[in-house]
């Protein structure tokens, strides 16, 4: 995982919590990948920004040889331990931009909610060089939208962000209506600028529910939230806990997962 303004380092500092609270991805998303590129025991796969392996197991279960590239030392160690029973797993600790990788060697390179940390041109050109002719790049991510079903709770939480989060980062809140098909298609088109063909895009959806304490644990895995000064973060999180408990004690997140697929000619 690369570093942007120092925020990526925070994932590694909370590796166990990250592993516990971050979700995996929809089964249908993996089915779409495997329909696009057949992965089996003879396949070589590379994962960019593996974290603690939220997206790794469905590929390992195909029996492939998988090289996981993860910047964080704690996350790498957790990944190795978590999947120690898989002989085909190799974990490399280092920044994707800096790690030396084989060219024309991989059937699939994939990245789950991590590729945005890497400078665009560097990332796409390196993935292209790694892939064998006909090999595929799968880029996917989860985009959570809290409180879609509870406007009163959403308003209270927005007020807290206006009070604590946005002043801390000297930013103003913009309008957000959830991740759209148009946004996903715009990301998909990037691959075409770097020589990829057969570009495709799909969305997948789900919902997750959290108690106040569970939701605060989840927020504690978000780099920009962890980085807020401790006293400010304490007041911010206390307000969120109070708001959730005042509105029934449950916060629901509506997830949109986007999958972009592209092929090296």
Image: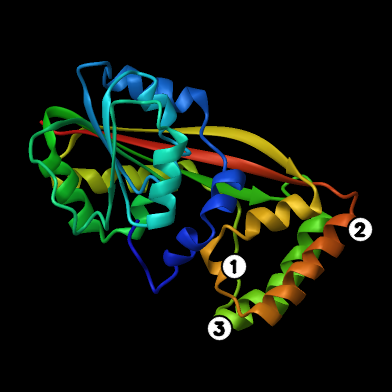
Quarter of the image with the N terminus in it = bottom left
Side of 220 relative to 24 (left or right): right
| Structural crowding at the residue carrying mark 3, measured as other residues with C-alpha within 10 Å and reported as few (<14), some (14–19) or many (≥20) | few
* Mark seen at residue 225: 1
**Mark 1 or 2, which is nearer the eye?**
1
Quarter of the image with the C terminus in it = top left
Look at the numbered discs 1 and 2 and tell me whether their residues touch, using CB distance below 8 Å: no
At x 90%, y 49%, the residue is: 248
Of labels 3 and 1, earlier in sequence is: 3
Q: Is residue 139 visible?
A: yes
Query: Residue 70 at x, y = what percent?
Result: 33, 50
| Structural crowding at the residue carrying mark 1, measured as other residues with C-alpha within 10 Å and reported as few (<14), some (14–19) or many (≥20) | some
Look at the numbered discs 3 and 2 and tell me whether their residues touch, using CB distance below 8 Å: no
Of labels 1 and 2, earlier in sequence is: 1
What separation in Å lies between label 1 and label 2 (alpha carbons)? 22 Å
* Relative to 32, residue 159 above or below: below
At x 46%, y 59%, the residue is: 12
At x 36%, y 55%, the residue is: 116
What secondary structure is found at the residue carrying circle 3?
A: loop
Query: Residue 228 at x, y = what percent?
Result: 59, 76
Q: Which residue is mark 3?
A: 170
Side of 33 relative to 154 (left or right): left
What secondary structure is found at the residue carrying circle 2?
A: helix
Query: Residue 43 at x, y = what percent?
Result: 21, 22
What secondary structure is found at the residue carrying circle 1?
A: helix
* Relative to 35, residue 23 above or below: below
Q: Which residue is mark 2?
A: 246
User: What is the quadrant of residue 55 in the picture?
Assistant: top left
């Amino acid at each position: 995982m690369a570093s942007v303004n120092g925020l990526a380092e925070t994932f590694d500092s909370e590796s166990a919590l990250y592993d516990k609270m971050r979700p995996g991805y929809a089964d249908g998303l993996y089915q779409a990948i495997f329909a696009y590129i057949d992965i089996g025991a003879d396949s070589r796969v590379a994962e960019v920004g593996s974290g603690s392996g939220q997206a790794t197991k469905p590929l390992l279960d195909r029996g492939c040889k998988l090289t996981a590239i993860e910047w964080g030392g704690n996350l790498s160690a957790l990944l190795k331990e978590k999947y120690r029973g898989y002989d085909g797993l190799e974990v490399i600790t280092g920044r994707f931009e800096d790690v030396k990788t084989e060219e024309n060697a991989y059937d699939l390179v994939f990245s789950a909610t991590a590729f945005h940390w890497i400078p665009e041109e560097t990332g796409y050109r390196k993935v292209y060089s790694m892939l064998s002719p006909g090999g595929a790049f799968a880029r996917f991510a989860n985009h959570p939208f809290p409180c879609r079903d509870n406007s009163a709770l959403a308003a209270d939480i927005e007020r807290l962000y206006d009070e604590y989060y946005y002043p801390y980062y000297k930013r103003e809140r913009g309008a957000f209506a959830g991740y759209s098909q148009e946004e996903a298609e715009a990301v998909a088109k990037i691959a075409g600028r770097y020589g990829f063909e057969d570009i495709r895009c799909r969305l997948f959806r789900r919902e997750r529910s959290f108690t106040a304490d569970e939701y605060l644990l989840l927020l504690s895995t978000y780099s920009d939230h962890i980085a807020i000064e401790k006293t400010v973060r304490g007041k911010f999180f206390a307000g969120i806990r109070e708001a959730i408990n005042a509105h029934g004690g449950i916060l629901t997140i509506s997830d949109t997962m986007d999958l972009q697929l592209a092929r090296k000619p």
